[in-house]
Structure formats: structure tokens, C-alpha cells
Amino acid sequence: MSFMRAFALLFAVVTMLVGAPLALAGNGATTTTTVYHKIAEREETGLPCGRDADALYNILITYDYITHTTTRPNGSVFTITETGTIVAWPPDEYSYLPTYTGHYSFSSQGISTAQSGVSPYTYRIHLKGDDGSNIAFASVEHLTIDPNGVIHELSLDNC
């Protein structure tokens, strides 16, 4: 699971399990919007749909992040949007592989109550290699937390 997917899952779970009970304590809706620009993160991971599935890449992601949350007496609603650029280059042991540059986007929405919550999210990557190759990857996931607190997750990845 990539850092961005893990973060989205964590945010969704926290919003659904903590945000909704807090919302029950208030009398009205409160709304917050948070915007961050040019966040830079670096990680080492494989590329989805890449030529060598075992190869690790150094990945630099620079993105803008917006989250919008409305908390109501009966639950909460949130939206997360990220969009940015990716540069992915192979370490020396994989120097035969191309360097990729491109764009990615991430979007998640969620609705929660004190008893349950639901959050679908999408993740898209479009990269072009310095050798002319292309990577196009899309992931759609759906997270549900039932009234017993059990997390159900469905995922569909497509190259």
C-alpha cells in the first residue's frame, strides 16, 4: 500500500470514527477547509504497471492538497483532493529502466454517522518514460465501516 493510499485510509477511518461522535455533541454544522501547496514527498517503491514489477524506483511527488470537512449533529462529510507531479528514477541497480515524469491525482469523499461510514476514492497516474514508454494506472477503492466497527474495503486497479 502506497503512502498516499495509507494516508487516505487513515484519514477516512479517523474522520468516520472520531468526527461523527464529535459532531453529535454540537448543535449545528461546522465547516473547515485546509489547503496546502507544493508539498514534496519522496519514497522508494515499485511503479504500478511498470516494465519490471520487482524494480524499486526513487519517487518524488510534488502536489497540492485540499481537504473540506463539514461536521453536523448527525455525522460528517469530507472531501480530499490532491493533484501534482511525479518524477520516478531507478536506482543504480535498475539503471536499465527508464526515468518517468508525469501527473497524478487523488480524490476521496466520505460520509459518516456515529454508527457507520463510507468513503470511495480514486487514484490516477499518467507517466511518460525517457525511452518513450507510457504508464497509465487507475485505482478505485471503496471503504465502509459498519455499525460494529468492522472495516470492509474493495479495490480495483487497472493498467
Image (cartoon, rainbow, N blue to C red):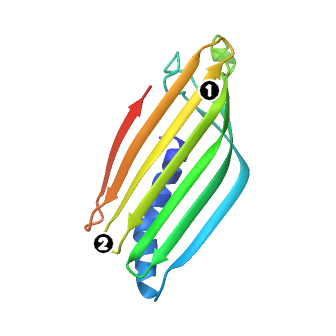
Residue found 45% across the figure and 67% down from its top: 77
Question: Helix, strand, or loop for circle 2?
Answer: loop
Toward the bottom, the furthest residue is 27
Which residue is at 57% across, 42% downward?
A: 105
In terms of image quadrants, where is residue 135?
top right
Q: Give the distance between the C-alpha atoms of the residues marked 2 and 1, in whole angstroms.
A: 41 Å
At a point 31% along the width and 67% down the height, the residue shown is: 116
Check the image and report above or below for 125 versus 20: above
State the residue lying farthest toward the right: 38
- Lower position in the chain sequence, tag 2 or tag 1: 1
Can see residue 3?
A: no
Viewer-proximal residue, 11 or 158?
Answer: 158
What residue is shown with label 1?
Answer: 57
Is 77 rendered above or below residue 74? Answer: above
Name the residue nearer the viewer: 51 or 134: 134
Instruction: Identify the secondary structure beneath mark 1.
Output: strand
Q: Considering the image in quadrants, where does the C terminus appear? A: top left
Q: Amino acid at mark 1?
A: Tyr
**x and y percentages locating residue 24 in the rendered image:** 40, 83
Residue name at image x 52 percent, y 36 percent: 124
Whole-percent x, y for residue 62 in the image: 70, 42
The x and y percentages for residue 80 are 54, 56
Q: Pointer 2: what residue?
A: 115
Specify the amino acid type for callout 2: Gln
